[in-house]
Image: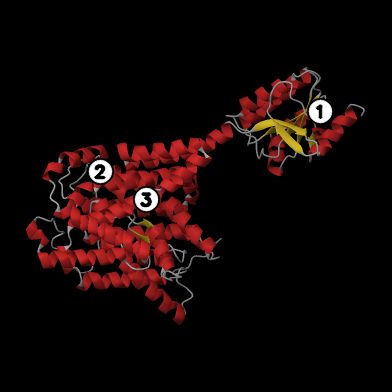
Amino acid sequence: MATFRMFSGVQPVTRDGAIRDALAGFQLAAMNIPQALGYTKIAGTPVITGLYTLLFPLLGFAAFGSSRFLVVAADSATAAILASGLGDLAPLASARYVELAGTVALLTGALLLIARLLKLGFLADFLSQTVLVGFLTGVGFQVGIAVLGELLGLQVHSQRSIGQLFEVVRGFPQLRLITPLISAVVVAVILGLHRLAPKVPGALIAVAGAIAASMFWDLAGHGVAVVGPVTGGLPRLGLPPMSWHDINQLVPVAGSCVVMIVAQSAATARFYATRHHQRLDEDADLVGLSAANAAAALSGTFVVDGSPTQTAMVEGSGGQSQLAQVATAAVVALVLLFLTKPLQYLPRCALGAIVFVIATRLVDLRGLRDIQRESPGEFALASLTAAIVVLIGVEQAIILAMVLSLLRVLNHSYHPQTGVLVQGEQGLWETKPALAETITEPGLVIYRFGAALFYANAGLFAHEVRMLARASGVRWLVVDAEAITNVDYSAARMLLDLSQNLKQIKVEFSFARTAPSLRADLVRHRVVEAIGEQRIFPRLHNATAAFRMSQGS
């Protein structure tokens, strides 16, 4: 059992390492603060709550998590889930909305802790990469469409992507050039610097420039919407007010967030732990994620997640432990105390432009093309997931993503690869389709079944074995059980009936290459007793040798 240690993602601390991580933390803050402000537009919360996500939640994960690289803060996917779940319950950015967002964060933290206690982290493995690409691509389109009105300076009231597009198109006659011009400049600065100088905080430069321009030219006086007064200082700590009615309404939203958090955080943490040959305790990371979301709730902000993009940022800045994230939190605390006043001049369209850039990075067209080229069926699943996000909603899409991933797993087990083994010219085994009259050699069929044998696929197994056994001249039917790891009760009953059927038509029924787990199941369900211990062979050539001996050859 793994021993619990606080700040395992920080230790050991050395002087050189602390200096390196502190510098990386300062760079991460410079790149991340503008993005955190942008995520509030996705989540529907006040601008200041974006800075709060970079304060106590970072410290919570640093204290309890094990990953040395994972950055836990605001993320577009969970922010979109939050907005989708709360949009009909309270006005965006209202005090009531913030209370509900805090309740979701608290419930998310509680569910993550329950997942740790029940060791449910493995559930993230059921969200396949295919549907995850489709889900995040759909979120990218949904978020990009949602901020079009703000980019162009048009009023949009619909909560649905199609309605938002319709309102934007309908509002074109009221379009004023100054707002889309500012948006275009901000997007160009961010993308241009990212391409020419990736380590330069392009978003921070764009935000600073937009604030300076707003102050110098009084953009608010020229009809450009600005953020307005921002309350500075550290957040006030306290539990969000909640009732049982709120909890019942918000548990599904929190559950959707948990699925995304566990899947995305686990994948990101594993990647960087493997890349840097570091030990990773996924159970400790669940506790860290739980603590980070509890800290988010206590500090008046919204749900946080392990972010792949922000984790890549800290690695690119030279950070090698959670001390970099602690340094980021320290920088953010200074900003909250002394530098929030200029934010009131920030044009809202500039904030929308940052969100738009974030959205474009979520749209993984290259990943979709790769999936389409290699697996058209999986491409259809990814595309369907993306379409559900845009047309119906994020919560429904995350549930669909899990269901589709599970259905693919079940489909592989329900329709496994099967065939008849035959020896090629060089003596190597080849698999031929399991068709009537297909044999391994005269009198012998070696039948391969490519999955565990259970109630759902037992019918396919029985059908193909009976079909092959009825071929003219077949005397032995051997099951190559290398891929059959276990047999359930229903499938065992089928095997017992099948062995009786084959005896009636004078065909010997045997198994070869049985794993210890399968052999134990066959013994427990009395299948070995029915067919005989001598009909369980360790290898294929033992089975073929016994067949040939029985035929006198």
Q: Nearer the viewer, mark 1 or mark 2?
A: 1
Q: Amino acid at mark 2?
A: His
Cα gap from disc 1 to disc 2, whole angstroms: 69 Å
Answer with mark 3 or mark 2, whichever residue precedes in sequence: 2
Left or right: residue 113 versus residue 228 is right
What is the secondary structure assignment of the residue under circle 2? helix
- Which image quadrant for residue 503? top right
Q: Nearer the viewer, mark 3 or mark 2?
A: 3
**What's the mark number on residue 245?**
2
What is the secondary structure assignment of the residue under circle 3? helix
| Residue furthest bottom as drawn | 15
Left or right: residue 96 versus residue 421 is left
Cα gap from disc 3 to disc 1, whole angstroms: 55 Å
- Which image quadrant for residue 23? bottom left
Colour basis: secondary structure
What residue does disc 3 label?
A: 362
- Residue 239 visible here: no
Disc 1 packing (10 Å; few <14; some 14–19; many ≥20): few
Q: Residue at x 40, y 49 (%)?
A: 260
What residue does disc 1 label?
A: 441
Q: In the image, is residue 525 above or below residue 256?
A: above
Q: Residue at x 80, y 33 (%)?
A: 535
Left or right: residue 548 versus residue 479 is right
Cα gap from disc 3 to disc 2, whole angstroms: 34 Å
Q: Are marks 1 and 2 in contact (CB under 8 Å)?
A: no
Q: In the image, is residue 419 above or below residue 291?
A: above
Disc 2 packing (10 Å; few <14; some 14–19; many ≥20): few
Disc 3 packing (10 Å; few <14; some 14–19; many ≥20): many
Q: Nearer the viewer, residue 481 or 163?
A: 163
- Which image quadrant for residue 543? top right
Q: Amino acid at mark 1?
A: Glu
The picture places residue 98, in percent across and down from the top left corner, at 22, 54
